[in-house]
Amino acid sequence: MKLNIRLVVLLFFVMLLSLGLYACTKEKKVGEVVVIEKEFKLVKDGKYSFSLDVTGKVKNVGDVDLKSIVVTGYCRSCNEIMVGNTWYSTEQVRSQEQNDVISYLVVGDTAVFSFHDIAFYYTQLGEEPSELPEKLEVVIESFETVE
């Protein structure tokens, strides 16, 4: 009988200790940033060439402040080879002009981004392209959370 009471008391203290340790653990805060606005602009670079620039806004919708947010864009329907009268892009090698880095973003706040040259158009006639390429997207490449 004494063994059963000691076992119950021991189990009670183990459960109490477990509950205390569980209450002390911190919940991991998650960082999340989303693109809320984007606008693609056609720019005439030369007599026969055009490019696409992007401007827009991102918002921190996570639980923690963020830093070093890298925003870039892709043209998924563009060719990777320069051919006249078609849109093309360089997906493998990206320059610094093809992304923007937002240094710090507080929870719930928005920031403006802009970058250049996500897609190119070359024509021998010098006329503007009739429409923008399909499958244009702006993505958040990476970010760091602030502890």
Image: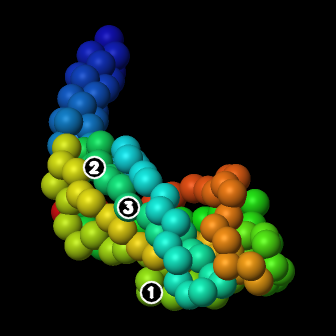
- Image quadrant in which the N terminus is located: top left
2 to the left or right of 24: right
Q: Residue at x 32, y 64 (%)?
A: 113
Q: Can you say whether 111 is above or below 35 in the image?
A: below
Residue named by callout 3: 55
Q: Residue at x 47, y 62 (%)?
A: 41
The amino acid beneath tag 3 is Thr
Front position among marks 1 and 3: 3
Residue 96, disc: 1
Q: Nearer the viewer, residue 142 or 146?
A: 142
Q: Residues within 10 Å of mark 2 (few under 14, many from 20)?
A: many
Where in the figure is residue 37, as x and y percent of width and height? 38, 47
- Callout 1: SS: helix
The amino acid beneath tag 2 is Asn
From mark 2 to mark 1, how far is it between C-alphas? 23 Å
Q: Earlier in the sequence, mark 1 or mark 3?
A: 3
Q: Earlier in the sequence, mark 2 or mark 3?
A: 3
Q: Residues within 10 Å of mark 1 (few under 14, many from 20)?
A: few
Q: Residue at x 44, y 83 (%)?
A: 97
Front position among marks 2 and 3: 3
- Image quadrant in which the C terminus is located: bottom left
The amino acid beneath tag 1 is Gln
Q: Using the rendered image of the protein, determine whether residue 28 is visible from the camera's viewpoint.
A: no
Where in the figure is residue 54, as x and y percent of width and height? 44, 64
- Callout 3: SS: strand
Q: Using the rendered image of the protein, determine whether residue 81 is visible from the camera's viewpoint.
A: yes
138 to the left or right of 135: left
Do tag 2 and tag 1 residues touch (Cβ < 8 Å)? Answer: no
Where in the figure is residue 6, as x and y percent of width and height? 26, 23
